[in-house]
């Protein structure tokens, strides 16, 4: 039964239908607005270093401070499929070596005995008359990189020279060498010495030197990042140094706010040694690590580093292809078996098999500049 009531020209039935439609519209409107405001927003980000556009899909969210938004963009800019992270942090400890020389040893300590193919890393700080007088080596390479001052090198084959701040000496000991490394100037001589293992097939090759002056080491500065390419390549430039054991050795300086993305072959071991300042390694929100620390990196195809401090951060990034061979070391002799090390000691003591010129040899006194 229908009941009609006249209200002007509008029936009660028509009024009821209009009122019902209005109620339904008011109920549907909030859901419609919620659906509209919860749709994803597409952001396009262009990283200045790699010039690659990346789409980041993120739901709408309340306003955040600008610094938080920058953090999100930086994290998204990592170009690596598997970024390397920090697996070990080690503070290097001071100890005496040679004749009163003070070194900070990182690799080569009980906590990090070796990191194949690397045997040792020392940061040395030496003032005359301390130094490293005549001593032998066999089976590996020594890499000396001067940061401050100068060192003079002499060996039993008659080679002699001086490396100064920024210079590099890459010495292959091979089957055997006897040499000295002594300060060449007054005051503090500051540098790094890295020991790189040689494969079994290369341990008995003839000794060899590669030396580069500071002006000959490739360098580049871009977007707040400076690098000296000692070995390997970075930021489009490559070192002329030949490495029998494939190695990268990069000296980086990051200005405040700078970000570094450095590719590393994914099957290489790699580590960082911090010389000055502090940065976040592996993640922008990761631990801040400062000077005199060694940072062992996990496996992956590259590492990202953020300098969020107010000062310069300087560090060396070193990586190498593992040899995956047995290592037997006794002091300056590094071979594959105990028997080979015993042979090396006997060869040195008796002056044979590469040590023929060792008997009676003594380095000349160094005149300080």
Image (cartoon, rainbow, N blue to C red):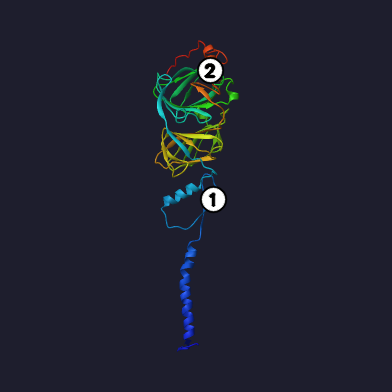
Q: Residue at x 47, y 78 (%)?
A: 20
Which one is nearer the viewer's eye here, 338 or 57?
Answer: 338
* Number of marks: 2
- The residue carrying mark 2 is 342
- Disc 1 is placed on an element classified as strand
Q: Residue at x 47, y 83 (%)?
A: 15
| Residue 261 visible here | no
Circle 1: is it few (<14), some (14-19), or many (20+) Cα within 10 Å?
A: some
Q: Is residue 213 above or below residue 223?
A: above
- Pick whichever of labels 1 and 2 is earlier in the sequence: 1
Query: Where's residue 41, x and y in %?
Result: 50, 58
- The residue carrying mark 1 is 54
339 sits left or right of 6 in the view: right
Q: Residue at x 49, y 35 (%)?
A: 227
Q: Which mark is residue 181?
A: none
| Residue 327 visible here | yes
Query: Where's residue 129, x and y in %?
Result: 40, 18
Q: Is residue 53 above or below residue 215?
A: below
Q: Residue furthest top?
A: 360
Give the quarter of the figure containing the C terminus: top left
Cβ–Cβ under 8 Å for marks 1 and 2? no
**What distance separates the C-alpha of mark 1 from that of mark 2?**
59 Å
- Disc 2 is placed on an element classified as helix
Of badges 1 and 2, nearer the viewer stands 2
Q: Residue at x 47, y 70 (%)?
A: 29
Q: Residue furthest right?
A: 201
Query: Where's residue 131, x and y in %?
Result: 43, 20
Circle 2: is it few (<14), some (14-19), or many (20+) Cα within 10 Å?
A: few
Query: Where's residue 61, x and y in %?
Result: 45, 57
Which one is nearer the viewer's eye here, 30 or 253?
Answer: 30
Q: Is residue 347 above or below residue 17?
A: above
Q: Quadrant of residue 289?
A: top left
């Amino acid at each position: 039964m229908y009941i009609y009531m006249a209200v002007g020209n509008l029936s009660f039935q028509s009024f009821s239908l209009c009122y019902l439609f209005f109620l339904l519209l008011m109920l549907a409107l909030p859901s419609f607005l919620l659906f509209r405001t919860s749709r994803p927003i597409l952001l396009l980000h262009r990283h200045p270093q790699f010039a690659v556009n990346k789409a980041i899909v993120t739901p709408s969210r309340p306003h955040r401070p600008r610094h938080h938004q920058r953090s999100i963009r930086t994290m998204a800019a990592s170009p690596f499929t598997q970024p390397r992270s920090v697996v070990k942090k080690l503070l290097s400890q001071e100890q005496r070596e040679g004749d009163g020389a003070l070194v900070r040893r990182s690799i080569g300590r009980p906590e990090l005995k070796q990191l194949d193919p690397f045997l040792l890393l020392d940061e040395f700080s030496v003032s005359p008359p301390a130094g490293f007088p005549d001593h032998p080596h066999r089976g590996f390479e020594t890499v000396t990189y001067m940061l401050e001052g100068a060192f003079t090198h002499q060996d039993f084959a008659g080679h002699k020279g001086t490396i100064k701040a920024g210079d590099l000496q890459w010495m292959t000991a091979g089957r055997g060498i006897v040499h000295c490394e002594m300060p060449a100037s007054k005051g503090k001589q500051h540098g790094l010495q890295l020991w790189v293992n040689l494969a079994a097939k290369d341990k008995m090759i003839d000794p060899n030197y590669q030396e580069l002056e500071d002006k000959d080491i490739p360098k580049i500065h871009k977007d707040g990042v400076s690098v000296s390419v000692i070995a390997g390549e970075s930021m489009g430039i490559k070192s002329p140094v030949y490495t029998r054991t494939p190695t990268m050795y990069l000296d980086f300086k990051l200005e405040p706010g700078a970000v570094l993305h450095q590719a590393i072959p994914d099957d290489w071991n790699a580590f960082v040694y911090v010389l000055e300042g502090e940065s976040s390694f592996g993640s922008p929100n990761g631990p801040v690590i400062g000077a005199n620390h060694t940072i062992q990196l996990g496996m992956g195809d590259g590492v990202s580093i953020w300098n969020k401090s107010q000062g310069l951060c300087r560090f060396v990034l070193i990586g190498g292809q593992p040899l995956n061979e047995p290592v037997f070391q006794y002091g300056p002799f590094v071979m594959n078996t105990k028997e080979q090390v015993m042979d090396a000691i006997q060869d040195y003591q008796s002056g044979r098999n590469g040590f023929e010129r060792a008997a009676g040899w003594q380095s000349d006194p160094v005149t300080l500049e």
